[in-house]
Image (cartoon, rainbow, N blue to C red):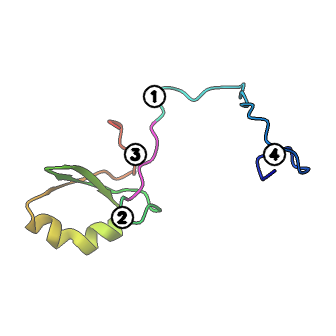
């Protein structure tokens, strides 16, 4: 029984649903969310030695001095979409 059963106290059957219909285009770019709050669209990419961190404008403003003080680079992307990801 459970929420994944038939809805009337039945056991889940273990079957997999196959979705038929249009598939998303391969070149569709998904929005990137802020790595700090996970809600707002990322407006900047902070390039660190360990990899990139994506931040919204609020968190970039809050942490800007620390980011620049650590010697990291900030790359601004206005739309929140990063074509290389």
Check whether the beta carbons of the residues at disc 3 and disc 2 lie within 8 A of each other. Answer: no
Q: Main secondary structure of the magenta part?
A: loop
**Cα–Cα gap, marks 3 and 4:** 38 Å
Quadrant assignment, res 82: top left
Considering depth in this image, is 16 or 49 the residue closer to the camera? 16
For this orientation, the residue located farthest to the right is 8
Check whether the beta carbons of the residues at disc 2 and disc 4 lie within 8 A of each other. Answer: no
Q: Mark 3 vs mark 4: which is more N-terminal? A: 4
Q: Mark 1 vs mark 2: which is more N-terminal? A: 1
Q: Is residue 54 left or right of residue 33?
A: left
Seen at 13% across and 57% down, the residue is 72
Q: Nearer the viewer, mark 4 or mark 1?
A: 4
Q: Which residue is mark 2?
A: 36
Instruction: Specify whether residue 45 is painted magenta.
Output: no
x, y (%) of residue 36? 36, 64
**Cα–Cα gap, marks 1 and 2:** 27 Å
Q: Which residue is mark 1?
A: 27
Q: Nearer the viewer, mark 3 or mark 4?
A: 4
Q: Is residue 73 left or right of residue 9?
A: left
x, y (%) of residue 37? 41, 66
**Cα–Cα gap, marks 4 and 1:** 36 Å
Considering depth in this image, is 78 or 52 the residue closer to the camera? 52
Which element is circle 2 on?
A: loop
x, y (%) of residue 59? 32, 69
x, y (%) of residue 74? 19, 56
Considering depth in this image, is 12 or 26 the residue closer to the camera? 12
Per the rendered image, the range of residues in magenta is 29-34
Check whether the beta carbons of the residues at disc 1 and disc 3 lie within 8 A of each other. Answer: no
Q: Which residue is mark 3?
A: 81
Q: Is residue 9 left or right of residue 79?
A: right
Which element is circle 3 on?
A: loop
């Amino acid at each position: 029984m459970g929420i994944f059963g038939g809805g009337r106290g039945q056991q889940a059957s273990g079957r997999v649903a196959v979705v038929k219909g249009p598939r998303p285009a391969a070149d569709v770019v998904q929005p990137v969310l802020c790595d700090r709050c996970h809600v707002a669209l990322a407006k900047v990419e902070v390039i660190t030695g360990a990899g990139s961190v994506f931040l919204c404008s609020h968190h970039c403003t809050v942490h800007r001095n620390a980011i620049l003080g650590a010697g990291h680079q900030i790359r601004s992307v206005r739309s929140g979409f990063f074509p290389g990801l």
